[in-house]
Image (cartoon, rainbow, N blue to C red):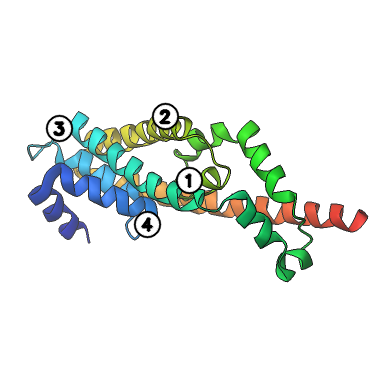
């Protein structure tokens, strides 16, 4: 996989990085950690520049995020309310007005989650979905996505360039970090799920 990625980036340069990162944001077959750190390493032996790789990867991140955000925005409030009125969601305890409550909460408290979410493995790709469902404004979404992606990409590309031939060490560290993030997310999901279920029973 590394050999293929190296040849692909060497042959198509910034276009390859834009394409790979855009695809990774929608369906992550290759983690961004691999693409970004490898891109940083390849700066030394190709015509690529550090700034160029960072900007290309950020553009790819924005393109991928826009696609998911656009799809999610089509889930309008009436559609969400209709979905919550189905037997399955009623059985789970959801109500029609829960859709508006969720949108209001994300609009009030969750805007910053777009920025921070772009810097967290796994979450960084998915954060565009609730943002789209909550109908966050395009300007806010694009600004926060761009800034968050720029931070994430700059760190990883910079680390790949700094580590040189040992760039894969960075990938291994982030792999371990990703596992921890997934476990923590599962724990939080279970915790809040139980808490929510108990509150429903009391009502």
Rendering coords of residue 18 (x, y %): 24, 45
Find disc 2 in the rendering and name its residue: 143
Labelled pair 4, 3 in contact (Cβ < 8 Å): no
Q: Is residue 182 visible?
A: yes
In the picture of the structure, the residue carrying the numbered disc 4 is 28
**Residue 34 visible here:** no
On the rendered structure, is 138 left or right of 50?
right
> Which of the 4 quarters of the picture holds residue 46?
top left
Look at the numbered disc 3 and give the secondary structure of its residue. Answer: loop
Binning the other alpha carbons within 10 Å of mark 3 as few (below 14), some (14 to 19) or many (20 upward) gives some
Q: Circle 3 is placed at which residue position? A: 49
In the image, residue 25 sits, relative to residue 105, either above or below, namely below
Mark 2: secondary structure: helix
Which residue is at 15% across, 32% downward?
49
Residue at image coords 11%, 55%? 7
Query: Who is closer to the viewer here, 99 or 156?
Result: 99
Q: Which residue is mark 1?
A: 128
Q: Which quadrant: the N terminus?
A: bottom left
């Amino acid at each position: 996989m590394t050999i293929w990625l190296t040849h692909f980036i060497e042959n198509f340069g910034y276009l390859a990085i834009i394409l790979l990162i855009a695809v990774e944001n929608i369906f992550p077959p290759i983690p961004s950690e691999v693409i970004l750190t490898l891109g940083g390493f390849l700066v030394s032996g190709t015509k690529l520049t550090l700034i160029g790789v960072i900007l290309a990867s950020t553009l790819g991140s924005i393109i991928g995020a826009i696609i998911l955000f656009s799809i999610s925005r089509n889930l309008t409030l009436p559609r969400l309310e209709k979905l919550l009125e189905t037997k399955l969601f009623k059985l789970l305890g959801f109500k029609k007005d829960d859709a508006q409550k969720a949108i209001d909460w994300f609009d009030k408290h969750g805007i910053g989650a777009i920025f921070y979410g772009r810097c967290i493995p796994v979450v960084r790709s998915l954060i565009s979905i609730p943002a789209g469902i909550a109908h966050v404004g395009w300007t806010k979404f694009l600004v926060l996505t761009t800034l968050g992606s720029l931070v994430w990409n700059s760190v990883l590309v910079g680390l790949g360039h700094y580590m040189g031939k040992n760039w894969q060490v960075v990938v291994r560290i982030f792999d371990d970090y990703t596992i921890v993030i997934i476990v923590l997310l599962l724990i939080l999901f279970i915790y809040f799920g139980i808490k929510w279920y108990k509150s429903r029973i009391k009502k």
